[in-house]
């Protein structure tokens, strides 16, 4: 998920339709956060149900971001023909069905189909949801995207809590995922009827898409791209392996282990709520440096955690660190290209998928060859690579000229 790009005001009254559309999209982000958290916190149960070996698990996990990238590209073509609202209305309920499918099967080929569909649909959802959000943001004429991503974090907390209750009461994946799909899918359909459309947005989505398509040079963005990739490698490591580390590495009960991801998402939500004030007080460079150091500390503490609660606390610390880095990457890209900030954000967001593609196989391969404790040191070292890049987050005295 990407953070908020800079926007240029688009004169338009804030009609009731716009406000309803904004609220509906926030609910959509929350539902997706819930769905995603349910999947990633139940990886140990998925592995057990399908007899998936530790060596094969990273392959399945890596396939999801690859297919998400494909889905994102394909959705751009669909959006041109039907609009972001139409795509989002279809793919979000379909994701709920793919989640249910992941819990109802019992053979590896069934899991492969369910996760493959989940990956493709997540890519399409991510693209269409953010396109619609950027369109609303352009129409509002001010940044509102951070609120949408805070709703995603809130959904992640809800999903992790539901998964923990499911494990505590031994509901099993068919009941947990099946019930979640049966509840969330109708909510997604209902929410989709309230999305803002052409009557409310006018040409805002098209204007945002045209801005994002403009050509800008890669070179000034490369340090920020590297920082983004490192941050998402850390995020992918937590999403896919925090619960598994506690269950397999520390011998924790599955219901308690899910608190590791819940604590991480709570920290992300609180960090996003307080992050802007920290930047205003201490500056972006200090916040990014502190975030990278805190994230590395979280990984280090998790790697040596003697108990489950120590591990949960470590991943919570880690969340406070990561949440400070990702939004500032987008903000720095917007400052580099103030006239083409949407294009810069689109470039930087590609490294969301790069981070997930690298993070899951890296941690899984090291864990399979040694242990999860050693595996957590890899993302720790990579997130430390953000420290020397922190100077790139300082406001420049003169912005790079807009591309022509």
Image (cartoon, helix red, strand yellow):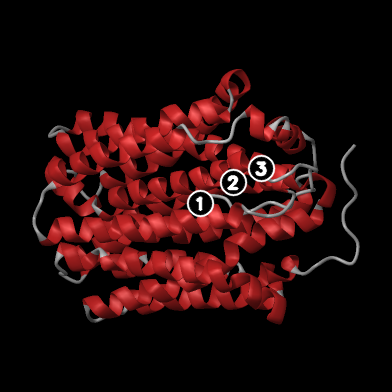
Q: Which residue is mark 1?
A: 355
- Residue found at the far top of this picture: 81
Residues under labels 2 and 3: Cα distance?
Answer: 7 Å
Q: Residue furthest left?
A: 170
Q: Quadrant of the C terminus?
A: top right
**Proximity of marks 1 and 2: CB atoms separated by less than 8 Å:** no
Residue 371 visible? The answer is no
For label 3, count other residues whose C-alpha is less than 10 Å away and answer few (under 14), some (14-19) or many (20+): few
**Disc 3 target residue:** 15
Give the mark nearer the N terminus: 1 vs 2. Answer: 2
Nearer the observer, 224 or 94: 94
Question: Which image quarter: residue 16?
Answer: top right
Picture quadrant where residue 20 is located: top right
Question: How far apart are the alpha carbons under marks 1 and 2?
Answer: 34 Å
Whether residue 245 is situated above or below residue 78 in the rendered picture: below
Q: Where residue 160 appears, x then y in whole percent?
A: 29, 59
**Regarding mark 1 in the picture, which secondary structure is present there?**
helix
Dot placed on the residue nearer the N-terminal end, 1 or 3: 3
Label 2 Cα neighbours within 10 Å, binned few <14 / some 14-19 / many ≥20 = some
Residue 347 x/y as whole percent: 67, 44
Task: Identify which residue is drawn at 14% across, 41% down.
Answer: 174
- The residue wearing badge 2 is 19
Q: Nearer the viewer, residue 275 or 102?
A: 275
Crowding at mark 1 (Cα within 10 Å: few <14, some 14-19, many 20+): many
Task: Please identify the quarter of the rendering in which residue 217 is found.
Answer: top right
User: How much space separates mark 1 and mark 3, taking CA atoms?
Assistant: 39 Å
Give the percent coordinates (x, y) of residue 395. Answer: 80, 67
Depth check, mark 1 against mark 3: the one in front is 3
100 left or right of 269?
A: left
Mark 1 vs mark 2: give the one in front.
2
Judging from the image, what secondary structure is the residue with disc 3 in?
A: loop
**Proximity of marks 2 and 3: CB atoms separated by less than 8 Å:** yes
């Amino acid at each position: 998920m990407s953070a908020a790009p800079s926007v240029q005001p688009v004169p338009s009254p804030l009609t009731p339709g716009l406000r309803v559309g904004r609220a509906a999209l926030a609910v959509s982000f929350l539902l997706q956060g819930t769905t995603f958290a349910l999947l990633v916190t139940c990886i140990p149960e998925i592995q057990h149900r399908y007899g998936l070996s530790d060596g094969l698990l990273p392959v399945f996990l890596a396939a999801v971001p690859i297919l998400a990238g494909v889905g994102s590209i394909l959705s751009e073509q669909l959006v041109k023909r039907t609009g972001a609202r139409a795509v989002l209305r279809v793919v979000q309920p379909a994701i709920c069905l793919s989640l249910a499918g992941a819990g109802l099967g019992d053979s590896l080929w069934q899991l492969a189909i369910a996760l493959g569909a989940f990956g493709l649909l997540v890519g399409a959802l991510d693209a269409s949801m953010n396109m619609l959000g950027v369109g609303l943001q352009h129409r509002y004429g001010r940044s509102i995207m951070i609120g949408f991503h805070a709703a995603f974090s809130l959904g992640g907390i809800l999903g992790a809590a539901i998964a923990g209750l499911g494990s505590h009461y031994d509901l099993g994946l068919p009941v947990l995922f099946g019930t979640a799909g049966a509840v969330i899918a109708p909510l997604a359909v209902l929410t989709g009827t309230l999305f803002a459309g052409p009557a409310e947005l006018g040409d805002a989505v098209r204007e945002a898409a045209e801005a994002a398509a403009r050509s800008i040079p890669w070179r000034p963005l490369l340090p920020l791209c590297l920082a983004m990739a490192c941050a998402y490698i850390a995020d992918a490591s937590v999403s896919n392996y925090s619960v598994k580390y506690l269950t397999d590495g520390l011998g924790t009960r599955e219901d308690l282990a899910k608190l590791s991801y819940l604590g991480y998402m709570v920290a992300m939500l609180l960090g996003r709520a307080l992050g802007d004030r920290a930047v205003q007080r201490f500056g972006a460079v200090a916040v990014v440096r502190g975030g990278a150091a805190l994230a590395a500390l979280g990984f280090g503490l998790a790697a040596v955690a003697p108990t489950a609660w120590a591990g949960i606390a470590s991943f919570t610390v880690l969340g406070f660190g990561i949440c400070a880095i990702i939004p500032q990457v987008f903000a720095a890209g917007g400052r580099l290209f103030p006239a083409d900030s949407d294009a810069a954000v689109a470039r930087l967001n590609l490294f969301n998928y790069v981070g997930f593609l690298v993070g899951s196989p890296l941690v899984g391969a090291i864990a399979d060859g040694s242990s999860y404790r050693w595996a957590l040191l890899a993302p720790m070292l990579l997130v430390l690579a953000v420290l020397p890049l922190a100077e790139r987050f300082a406001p420049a005295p003169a912005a790079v000229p807009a591309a022509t």
